[in-house]
Amino acid sequence: MIGIDRLSLDIYGMEILKGVTFDMAAGEVFGLVGESGSGKSMTALSLMQLLPQGARTSGAARLDGRDLLTLSEREMCGLRGNDIGMIFQEPMTALNPVRSIGDQVAETLRIHGAAGRREALDMSREKLDRVGLSQIDLDRFPHELSGGQRQRVCIATAIALRPRLLIADEPTTALDVTTQAQILTLLRDLVDDEDMALLLITHDLAVVADMADHIGVMQRGVLVEHGATDVVLREQRHPYTRSLFEASRHQPTRRSAPHGQALLEVRQATREYPGPRKGVRRGPPVKAVNEVSLTLHEGESLGLVGESGCGKSTLTRAILGLDPIQGGGIRAFGHAVSPTMPHAMRAGIQVVFQDPYGSFNPRWKVEHLVAEPFHLISDKPQASERREQVGRALEEVGLSASDMEKYPHEFSGGQRQRIAIARALITNPRILVLDEAVSALDVSIRAQILDLLADLQTRLDLSYLFISHDLTVVRAITDRVLVMKSGEIVEEGATEAVFDAPGHPYTQALLAAAPRLPAFSRKES
């Protein structure tokens, strides 16, 4: 169905892809894995012919005998959305924020002449129902939906015309484990029901191990290994494949949790939001956080897990003093936390948000971004000292000091997350709140960041509040874990105890939904 033969790509003379070759059949899932910058996404964009200025391709990419690389832009416009659908990594950037979801799904149908306006809307309803959004009105806007729901809208748009090839570029990044499982099940069902080919691009080996029929491993634009998934993961013939496998199972070396003083205390915290409107009246208030209590000790790493919408982010914003609470209290370093707390307290509690790009000013260079928290301290460094400190912070997270001269858009998603971590560390905080801090990182960089966090905690006695959907990461980096559901803590305890013997049905469901890398025993060559 799809045959890629010696696909090469250069942009202004820089080699991006080098002789990539593989085949896909209808009804097959082909998993493409590798680190950020390995060429996974550029392979997909080459197939879609959505390449930047200065790009040149060679080789062939045949869809049912037609070489996509030789087609004109007009011909490709007829194929995109029709024969080839694509699900992008970040649904909020793929969707138009000022158009309803019904209109956006219908647009694909109308552009390709498959239906008129009214018929297209009816078909949009069918497609949204197909992806599990039967309860969502067509006139809803993207910002009114959860991350998982937005991703489902993108899937509905991509499959509107039943394409023969569906490309999914990191479709489950930053989704909670249950939503991720639902999205992956949906994609697998679509492949089986529609007999389409799915090119699944991800850095998560556990996902491809569970989903893909065949797997390709990319390194620096080269497909270094490919074949049946179980064979590739079992034999791991290429050293790079072995390194990815080992990184996926990486456990940072951590010290035993100390029993230091309590740095952060949350007691019966409650945060409410106005209820939804029903006509001219509002419904009852929604308790996003309902009488939550927790304690974070000096040098401790505390995990907070739960599905999207459970209240984790709301609680985090209250702990950071960004939002007030309506009940209970929060204290850090012995003082009350509130939106009006002094700058010195804010310097002691830094944060890495889930979406690094959303927390950056795109017009600022990295030097300015990383140095931004210096305004919280009274003894601000001078220009030369500031540059030196920024350079050190960037190198600590695996970047180069010279990167301070670049802008955020010049980096990959994983690199931007590392910049965010560097910014959080620049004021030498005592508490670091990590909200999905490694969700966008490939497995190798994730392992490095986890090692970095473990090392920093040992040297600086940092305390971590680690919020993540990735239960494997939570298990690797935390001493205790709290499980949150519907604004309440339903289970807590030592991390290993909770993961080995979860007591609450909700915790059991979370652990059951998490993808696991099979325990392959590699054959020695």
Image (spheres, grey):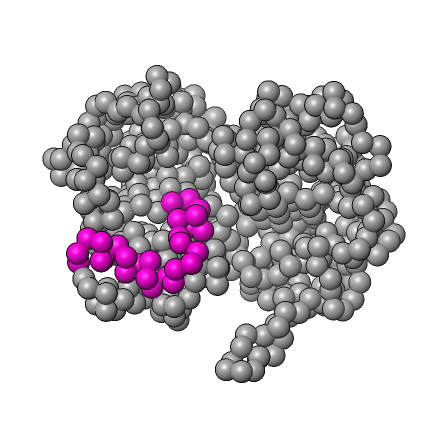
Residue 351 horizontal/vertical position (percent): 68, 44
- Left or right of residue 29, residue 334 in this image: right
Residue 225 horizontal/vertical position (percent): 33, 26
- Left or right of residue 201, residue 28 in this image: left
Q: Residue furthest left?
A: 65
Tell me if residue 493 is in the magenta stretch: no
- The answer, for residue 491, to whether it is visible in the render is no
Tell me if residue 95 is in the magenta stretch: yes
The quadrant of the rendering that contains the N terminus is top left
| Residue at the (12%, 35%) spot, across then down | 65
Instruction: Compare residues 282 and 261 and report the one nearer the observer.
Output: 282
Instruction: Compare residues 14 and 197 and report the one nearer the observer.
Output: 14
Q: Residue furthest top?
A: 13
| Residue at the (37%, 39%) spot, across then down | 201
Q: Is residue 324 above or below residue 249?
A: below
Q: Which residues are magenta?
A: 88-114
Residue 366 horizontal/vertical position (percent): 61, 30
- The answer, for residue 169, to whether it is visible in the render is yes
**Quadrant in the picture for residue 62:** top left
The quadrant of the rendering that contains the C terminus is top left
